[in-house]
Image (cartoon, helix red, strand yellow):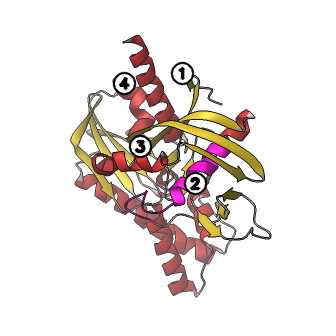
């Protein structure tokens, strides 16, 4: 558990993924369903302003601007509640450390910060418990980059970071520990693209429509509780997806003999289970919460630098 405080305010890093929300300590699906009346059997219900929101039963549909609707704000409140619950708190003054895809930072940073701070003080219920929070500040960092920022001093030569999430892949080239601003890329080829291809191919070849959770388990674990016939189709499509990922990285001048590749995000499981790569030149960061932790560490280092100035 992280107990980072800045001027008495609790710092919470949140990674707003299209597939999952991640904090330092928790991971849950980025799904929101709203109701005007309390759902009869649902769990993980957030209550705000007379509305009821069921959290985490599905994934978030891809949108280019994360402040386009209220979903990520509601998911942020749920993430905060989960972190406060771990600490035994029901109220707190907070600083949020969040992020955006690399290529969208310059255009969306200000609006996303305003979006998360639109209600500096808010009271709500989550899972039947009352929370009262004050959001005192929001810091927004480059997604993915935050997970490795503390290690950049060790990055000699040419490195490439590939953050493969559910909706996008964010790629950044780093030379001798220095990120190159003109070599950052965002592509809509996240893991959900692989899930959709698998679902379509299983339906076409086997006449079955597998539940998305079965496909996700297969991609994470390399196997699933279904027939070998269906697994063979899923395996083939997963391999094709990893080949597409490496083809895209090659477009950005990835060469395993010259470049050290670092892969983070949920897509790392696919690369590990189904990809063909040289393990000596590829690092797969398996901690799905690494980016959220990185946001906190970036804020902490900047806060300490300001204090020492």
User: Within 10 Å of the Cα at label 3, are there few (<14), some (14-19), or many (20+) other Cα atoms?
Assistant: many
Spatial separation of the CA atoms under disc 2 and disc 4:
35 Å
Foreground mark, 4 or 1, reads: 1
Q: Is residue 220 left or right of residue 272?
A: right
Q: Are marks 4 and 3 in contact (CB under 8 Å)?
A: no
Residue under pointer 4: 154
The mark found on residue 144 in the picture is 3
The relative height of residue 257 versus residue 299 in the rendered view (above or below) is below
The relative height of residue 38 versus residue 7 in the rendered view (above or below) is below
User: Within 10 Å of the Cα at label 1, are there few (<14), some (14-19), or many (20+) other Cα atoms?
Assistant: few
Between 142 and 260, the one nearer to me in the picture: 142
Q: Are marks 3 and 1 in contact (CB under 8 Å)?
A: no
| Residues rendered magenta in the picture | 62-82
Q: Earlier in the sequence, mark 4 or mark 1?
A: 1
Q: Earlier in the sequence, mark 4 or mark 3?
A: 3
**Residue 27 visible within the image:** no
Residue under pointer 2: 75
């Amino acid at each position: 558990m992280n107990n980072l405080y800045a001027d008495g305010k609790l710092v919470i890093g949140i990674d707003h993924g299209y597939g999952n929300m991640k904090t330092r300590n928790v991971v849950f699906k980025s799904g929101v369903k709203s109701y005007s009346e309390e759902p009869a059997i649902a769990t993980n219900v957030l209550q705000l302003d007379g509305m009821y929101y069921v959290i985490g039963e599905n994934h978030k549909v891809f949108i280019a601007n994360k402040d386009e609707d209220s979903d990520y704000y509601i998911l942020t409140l749920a993430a905060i509640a989960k972190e406060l619950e771990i600490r035994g708190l029901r109220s707190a003054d907070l600083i949020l450390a969040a992020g955006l895809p690399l290529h969208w930072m310059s255009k969306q940073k200000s609006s996303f910060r305003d979006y998360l701070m639109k209600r500096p003080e808010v009271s709500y219920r989550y899972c039947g418990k009352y929370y009262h929070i004050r959001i005192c500040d929001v810091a927004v960092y480059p997604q993915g980059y935050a997970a490795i920022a503390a290690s950049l001093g060790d990055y000699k030569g040419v490195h490439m970071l590939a953050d493969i999430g559910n909706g996008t892949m964010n790629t950044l080239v780093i030379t001798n520990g220095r990120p190159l601003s003109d070599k950052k890329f965002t592509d809509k080829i996240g893991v959900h693209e692989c899930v959709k291809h698998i679902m379509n191919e299983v339906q076409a070849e086997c006449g079955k429509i597998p539940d998305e959770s079965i496909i996700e388990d297969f991609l994470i674990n390399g196997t699933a509780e279904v027939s070998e016939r269906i697994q063979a189709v899923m395996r083939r499509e997963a391999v094709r997806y990893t080949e597409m990922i490496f083809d895209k990285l090659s477009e950005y001048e990835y060469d395993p003999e010259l470049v050290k590749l670092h892969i983070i995000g949920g897509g790392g499981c696919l690369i590990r289970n189904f990809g063909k790569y040289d393990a000596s030149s590829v690092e797969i960061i398996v901690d799905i919460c690494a980016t959220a932790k990185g946001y906190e560490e970036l804020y902490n280092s900047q806060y300490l630098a300001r204090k020492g100035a």
